[in-house]
Image (tube, helix red, strand yellow):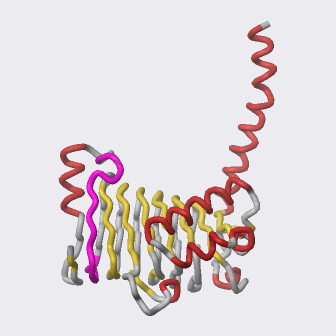
Amino acid sequence: MPIKNTNRTVGTILSHRIVKQHGQNGLPEDTIQLTFRGSAGQSFGAFLASGVTLHLIGDSNDYLGKGLSGGRIIVETPPGSMYMAHENIIVGNTVLYGATSGEVFINGMAGERFCVRNSGATAVVEGVGDHGCEYMTGGLVVVLGKTGCNFAAGMSGGIAYVLDEMQLFDTLCNLDMVDLESVWRQEDKDLLYRMIQKHERLTRSTRAQRILSSWQDSVSRFVKVIPIDYRKALERMRQAEARDTETTPATEEVFHG
């Protein structure tokens, strides 16, 4: 269906009705699927509930996915576009502000303050402006292109993977609270591959196709952004799991005699 920039908070009242009738867990995935064509107004998919998928072929104003609450938003560059999606802004500023859960796949760049205060949503985007992942406390973000400055300022949780083709990301990232790592663990590689593969399937992104077609080279160019304290907590969890694994056989031997 057509949409224009005076259509604001699309999906919000629907989400209210769903939660009111079915509770905060909403509906099963993709129960309701809506496709729009055009330029969406502010707060497209704000507070979108689980079970609702909004597919926008076009572009969107600011605050897309604000307070996302389990729903899925797909933004796709219109077929036949003459510009390169990963070099052009397709959604506005402050996308996914305060999101708690759900997924967003954006076939293009986002403006400034992408995923500010995100606490649990998953997002794939092909570039972001300044202050990306600011004050983020949870969730997962994959950036398949350029970032602006001050990335990860105040980021205390969650993980971001950024494609750093120009090897300049360390100069654009705020390192006060985060560490930068290469993507070397197999679990990280597998997770990243799955996310990019899903992005390509849902948005038909040529950027994602190119990355996947030369995966071994591409994955070496990604940087993992992880908060320092969060990384320490994960390491403690891994060590605890390793200790449990080591003691389990001995315990079973004593128990079974």
Q: Quadrant of residue 52?
A: bottom left
Going 58% across and 59% down the picture, which residue do you hit?
194
Q: Nearer the viewer, residue 96 or 216?
A: 216
On screen, 248 above or below 75?
above
Does 45 lie within the magenta span? no
Q: Quadrant of residue 8?
A: bottom left
On screen, 250 above or below 243?
above
Q: Nearer the viewer, residue 23 or 215?
A: 215
Q: Is there any visible trace of residue 124 in the rendered image?
A: yes
Instruction: Pinpoint residue 136: horizontal percent, then vertical percent.
Output: 52, 66
Q: Is residue 183 left or right of 159 when viewed as pictured? A: right
Q: Magenta span covers which residues? A: 27-42
On screen, 252 above or below 73?
above
Q: Quadrant of the N terminus?
A: bottom left
Instruction: Pinpoint residue 71: horizontal percent, then vertical percent.
Output: 35, 58
Q: Is residue 22 left or right of 171 when viewed as pictured? A: left
Q: Is residue 234 left or right of 7 when viewed as pictured? A: right
Q: Is residue 249 left or right of 132 when viewed as pictured? A: right
Q: Quadrant of the C terminus?
A: top right
Going 72% across and 75% down the picture, which residue do you hit?
221
Going 73% across and 38% down the picture, which residue do you hit?
240
